[in-house]
Image: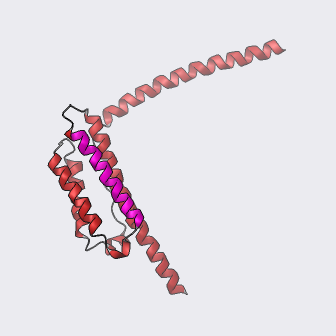
Amino acid sequence: MRKLLYLIVCFSFILGCKSDDTVAGDNKKEEKNSSEKSAKVSKQLYEFSPNAEQDIAEWSSFKLLTEKMDLLIKESNTTDIESLDELSKSIASVEKTIPQRIQNLSLNARLTVLKTQLGMYRDVVSNPLEQPKELHVKFIHNIIDAYNHCVFQVNDIVEKLETEERYKDLQ
């Protein structure tokens, strides 16, 4: 009986290993296909919620940053350091002109992450060695994610402020 149990366990182990190898082979094929597809920037910029739109209507530096981010997505093939420097200046301008109502440490942290991602990409672009396009796309996706997190943070701040105002009105 023990021998039979031992044979069943060994047989199951051997079959399990073979199926893992097959899965690993499939994963390699999927990675290759996804790397071919990821040679293009596929991320989109998120928009502000309608409530946040009212709070940031006069925040022109953020609107300028959004325009430059759109340009970065459209011209993802170019690696112009000057345009990256302009984008960096736009981020600095946004940091200086945050409306008082939504001024928050978490928003400042998100903007810092955006600056960091942009700085890392600038280092890649300024490297004299040829870099694969997938690396550029990866960094642009990281920059877009950081920008989108800034938008999410503004939306979250505005939502919390409005919830607090509604709560005060109820009391």
Can residue 47 be seen here? The reply is yes
The residue depicted at 21 percent of the width and 36 percent of the height is: 127
Tell which of 12 and 171 is nearer to you. Answer: 171
On screen, residue 143 versus residue 20, left or right, reads left
Magenta stretch encompasses residue 111? yes
Tell which of 163 and 19 is nearer to you. Answer: 163
Residue 166 image offset from top left, x and y in percent: 49, 81
Magenta stretch encompasses residue 163? no
The residue depicted at 32 percent of the width and 50 percent of the height is: 116
Can residue 42 be seen here? The reply is no
Q: Which residues are magenta?
A: 105-125
Residue 13 image offset from top left, x and y in percent: 66, 19
Residue 91 image offset from top left, x and y in percent: 26, 59
- Outermost residue toward the right in this view: 1
Quadrant of image for the N terminus: top right
The residue depicted at 80 percent of the width and 12 percent of the height is: 3
Q: Determine whether 43 is above or below 23 in the image.
A: below
Number of disc labels: 0
The residue depicted at 47 percent of the width and 22 percent of the height is: 25
Quadrant of image for the C terminus: bottom right
Q: Determine whether 102 is above or below 127 in the image.
A: below
Q: Main secondary structure of the magenta part?
A: helix
Residue 103 image offset from top left, x and y in percent: 37, 71
Q: How is the image coloured?
A: secondary structure
Res 105 quadrant in image = bottom left
